Image: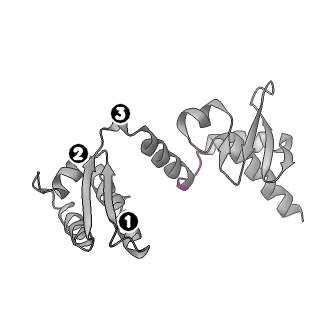
């Protein structure tokens, strides 16, 4: 639904709301007080009835979201401006980065680093920087790295990829 020529930011926002509502219902939150927050003003205002739905791509998603919303005893939609939504923004970037295939150049750099990766135990690894002057701690179980790129963007960095390549090469050798 969120890829290809018909995919737009609004389609992605509605899809996220629908998936969240489906999960809440499946997890037994029907009778709980639920607040759905989004930084998509258009999506939230449409779901609250403040804006009309004009897009033919969004209309079926809007209807599905409203149908799901009607199953809750108490549900409200709240718009959160992007600048006040940094935690959710970081989580969505991290989820996207984990789901997206790695950039081939980053994967090539990770493969170069892989032989220098040192296992520390418990799914943790010491991975050298590209220059070799620094070392970063990678925790594969948590999907984290202490490098500046991971701290800034929350994306799967070349150090995490290098640790994954190292683990796979050890598995392949067995």
Residue receiving disc 1: 19
**Which quadrant of the rendered structure holds the N terminus?**
bottom left
Q: Which of marks 3 and 2 is nearer the N terminus?
A: 2
Q: Is mark 2 on a helix, strand or loop?
A: helix
Q: What element carries label 1?
A: helix
Numbered tag placed on residue 41 in the rendering? 2
Numbered tag placed on residue 158 in the rendering? none
Q: Which of marks 1 and 2 is nearer the N terminus?
A: 1
Real-space CA distance between mark 1 and mark 3, rounded to the nearest whole angstrom: 24 Å
Q: In this view, does 156 lie above or below 62?
A: above
**Left or right placement of residue 122 versus residue 98 in this view:** right
Q: Is residue 154 above or below residue 66?
A: above
- Farthest residue, direction right: 174
In front here: 6 or 40?
40
- Residue at horizontal 16 percent and vertical 54 percent from the top: 46
**Which quadrant of the rendered structure holds the C terminus?**
bottom right
- Residue at horizontal 51 percent and vertical 52 percent from the top: 95
Residue receiving disc 3: 83
Q: Which of marks 1 and 3 is nearer the N terminus?
A: 1
1 and 3 marks in contact (CB < 8 Å): no
Real-space CA distance between mark 1 and mark 2, rounded to the nearest whole angstrom: 18 Å
Residue 4: x %, y % from top left: 36, 58
Q: In this view, does 120 lie above or below 2?
A: above
**Left or right placement of residue 158 versus residue 76 in this view:** right
Real-space CA distance between mark 3 and mark 2, rounded to the nearest whole angstrom: 13 Å
Residue 20: x %, y % from top left: 38, 63
**Left or right placement of residue 98 versus residue 12 in this view:** right
Question: Magenta segment, which residues?
Answer: 99-103
């Amino acid at each position: 639904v969120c890829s290809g020529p018909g995919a737009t930011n609004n389609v992605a926002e509605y899809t996220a709301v629908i998936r969240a509502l489906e999960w809440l219902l499946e997890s037994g939150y029907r009778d709980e007080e639920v607040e759905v927050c989004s930084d998509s003003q258009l999506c939230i205002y449409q779901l609250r009835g403040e804006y009309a739905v004009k897009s033919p791509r969004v209309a079926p998603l809007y209807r599905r979201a409203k149908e799901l919303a009607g199953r809750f005893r108490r549900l409200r939609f709240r718009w959160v401006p992007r600048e006040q939504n940094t935690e959710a923004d970081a989580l969505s970037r991290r989820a996207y980065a984990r789901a997206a295939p790695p950039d081939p150049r980053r994967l090539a750099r990770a493969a170069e680093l892989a032989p220098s990766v040192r296992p520390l135990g418990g799914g943790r690894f010491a991975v050298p920087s590209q220059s070799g002057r620094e070392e970063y701690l990678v925790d594969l179980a948590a999907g984290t790295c202490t490098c500046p790129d991971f701290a800034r963007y929350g994306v799967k960095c070349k150090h995490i990829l290098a640790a994954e390549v190292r683990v796979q090469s050890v598995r392949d050798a067995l």
